[in-house]
Image: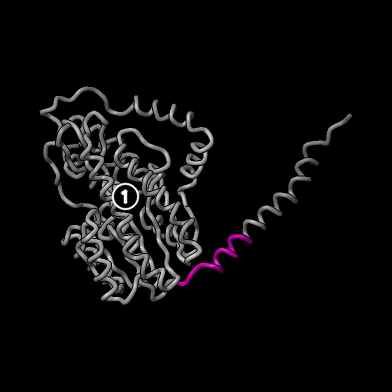
Amino acid sequence: MTSSPPSRRLGDLLPLAGALGLACVGSEVIARLREADLTGQVALITGGSRGLGLALARELASEGCRLAICARDADELQRAADDLRSRGAEVLTVNCDVAIRAHVDEMVDEVIAHYGQIDLLFTVAGIIEVGRLDLLDVQDFRRTMDIMFWGTLYPILAVLPGMRDRHYGRIATITSIGGKISVPHLLPYSAAKFAAAGLSEGLSAELMDEGIHVTTIVPGLMRTGSHLAAEFRGDADRQRREYQWFALGATSPLATRADRAARIIIRAVKRGETERTFPLIFDLASRVHCVAPATTIRLLRVIDRLLPSGNVSAGDVATARGMAVEERIDLPAWKAVTALGRDAADAFNEKIGHEPESPASGA
């Protein structure tokens, strides 16, 4: 029995490849035709004063949306509002701690009183704390859950009655690849993001028949400048080492810049997608983890061994923002490799000062 020559086998595959290509193009064309028009809609963005939240606000303004942004820091909000208004946006700013339900309810009431309704909700507010478990305590987990789980649930519960009355609404829950694959030295963050992802997936199933689309957003590495606002736990040496590995990932050219991430997210929301994970390598990683979780956990154990370790005396344990740690590193090579991250911090209002620089509670 003889086999077909390689050239013939390749020729047999070409029609199939062409058909698949046309199918992909056709699917994309149909998806674009079905994208919702957001012109004139009211978008509420929690954590909208900086980073990804600010990038989303800018992109939504270009879509013709009327904006409401909230954050805890009044100065940040003012800078963000000035930025958005300079781009022609209509924007309402509200001081709000999303971890406190009464504050969230008051904020939503204020937005509705101002605009009449809320059509779009983006839950972006969050914090990042980096450190090994032995330098953390329950309060660290509670604070992170308060902001990134309860601070996701409270705004959703507050906007749902109006969306249900109109049988229309779109909600984007910003989670993380850390909410699919738990990363060492980021346990409070990952725990909160896992909870938010579970909430978002369940809501998507429950609310679809009511005309409300819930999209779970799962970003991988993003270049927003957030490494300068993140909090690092340990003594001065541990803070520096934790900061360096985290900053290298957050400033890498492989990380998605915040404005591009915002465009990806808004496109997914306009299309009513159930979930969007990006960039592609993190989508693939998430799928591999679903199929072979033991394999990815073994890989994470290897990564953990490469991260900072060793004992820190209780009296030396403190928390410092990335901005403070960055200023301690005076190496030209370091400045060169992290230049993209500093540019992103300037572009997205992430240079927020040094606090906290205080002893960690109960470490």
- Circle 1 is placed at which residue position? 149
From the viewer's perspective, is residue 163 above or below residue 281? Answer: below
Q: Quadrant for residue 320, please give it.
A: top left
Query: Where is residue 359 drawn, in percent x and y?
Result: 12, 36
Residue at horizontal 62 percent and vertical 56 percent from the top: 24
Per the image, label 1 sits on a secondary structure element best described as: helix
Q: Quadrant of the C terminus?
A: top left
Is 30 part of what is drawn in magenta?
yes
Is 309 part of what is drawn in magenta?
no
From the viewer's perspective, is residue 124 above or below residue 304? Answer: below
Span shown in magenta: 26-37
Q: Amino acid at mark 1?
A: Phe
Position of residue 120 in the picture relative to residue 361 (left or right): right
In the image, 249 versus 274, the foreground residue is 274
Residue 52 in view in this figure: no
Position of residue 244 in the picture relative to residue 179 (left or right): left
Residue 26 in view in this figure: yes
Query: Where is residue 160 drawn, in percent x and y?
Result: 37, 65
Query: Where is residue 192 drawn, in percent x and y?
Result: 32, 44
* Residue, far top: 310
Q: How many marks?
A: 1
Residue at horizontal 36 percent and vertical 43 percent from the top: 252
Q: How is the image coloured?
A: one colour
Q: Quadrant for residue 317, please give it.
A: top left
Q: Main secondary structure of the magenta part?
A: helix
Position of residue 194 in the picture relative to residue 329 (left or right): right
Q: Quadrant of the N terminus?
A: top right
Query: Where is residue 150 drawn, in percent x and y?
Result: 29, 52
